[in-house]
Every structure is written in C-alpha cells, then in structure tokens.
Amino acid sequence: MDLDNRKFARFKASPRLQAFLQANDSALKTEGIVLNVSQGGAYILAPSIPFETATVRFVLEDSTISKQCRRVDPHLAQAQGMAVEFTDILAAEELEHLMDTEVPF
C-alpha cells in the first residue's frame, strides 16, 4: 500500500484514547488503546477478534463516539492490534475530539 496515496490523512490519537469493539455477527468483543485515527478509520492496539462488521465506541472524558466499521487487515489470533475502516467517515468535529492536537502523526 502506498502510504502517500491514502484517502484520508492519519493523526496520532489523543493520549490514552480507549476503544471498545463489539462484533455485529457474534458476541465477541475487545478493547484497547487507539494509536492513530483518520476520518476513514483507526488502528487499535487490542487483542484481535474475528469479525466482518462491528461497532466501535471511542470513550472520551465527556462523551462517546460510536461508528460502524469493518476490518482492513485479516484476523490473526495472536495479533495485538487491528486496523478498522469506518462505514461512514468521521465528521471533522469528531476527528478533532479523537486526535492528539499537540502531536502530528
């Protein structure tokens, strides 16, 4: 994948931003720290679970942002991270809440 041709710019996630993932097709769920985020997706450092679609919730100090998503990378049982693509892109205001405004990616 050519990183310069990404559809959306990536940003470092806000420090200690938590994400909770619940598979839509099973009872599987996982949680972890968001490493980076864009309007189109995120990379979450969490134990990998197999899913086609899921709901991801980002928990902020004063609110929660929920998005439907699908996996970008294949499920690997021992993986400690996963890339997700949002079904509907984040609004600019949502992205601003999730990204680290102090440090560019």
Image (spheres, helix red, strand yellow):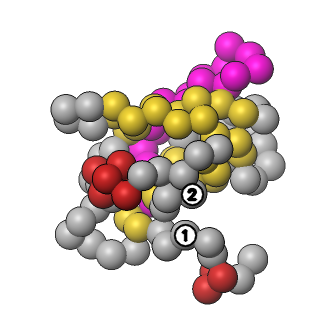
Between 57 and 8, the residue placed more toward the observer is: 8
3 is higher (above) or lower (below) than 57: below
Point out residue 59 in the picture as x, y percentages from the top left corner: 34, 33
Going by the numbered disc 1, the residue's amino acid type is Phe
Q: Residues within 10 Å of mark 1 (few under 14, many from 20)?
A: few
Q: Is residue 80 visible?
A: no
**Residue 43 x/y as whole percent:** 54, 54
> Which residue has dot 2 on it?
40
Magenta-drawn stretch, dominant element (helix, strand or loop): strand
CA separation, marks 2 and 1? Answer: 6 Å
- State the residue at coordinates (54%, 52%): 89
Residues shaded magenta: 19-36
Within the image, what quadrant is residue 30 found in?
top right
The residue that appears at 26% across and 31% down in the rendered structure is: 63
Task: Please tell me whether residue 28 belongs to the stretch shown in magenta.
Answer: yes
What mark, if any, has residue 8 been given in the picture?
A: 1
Marks 2 and 1 close (CB-CB < 8 Å): yes
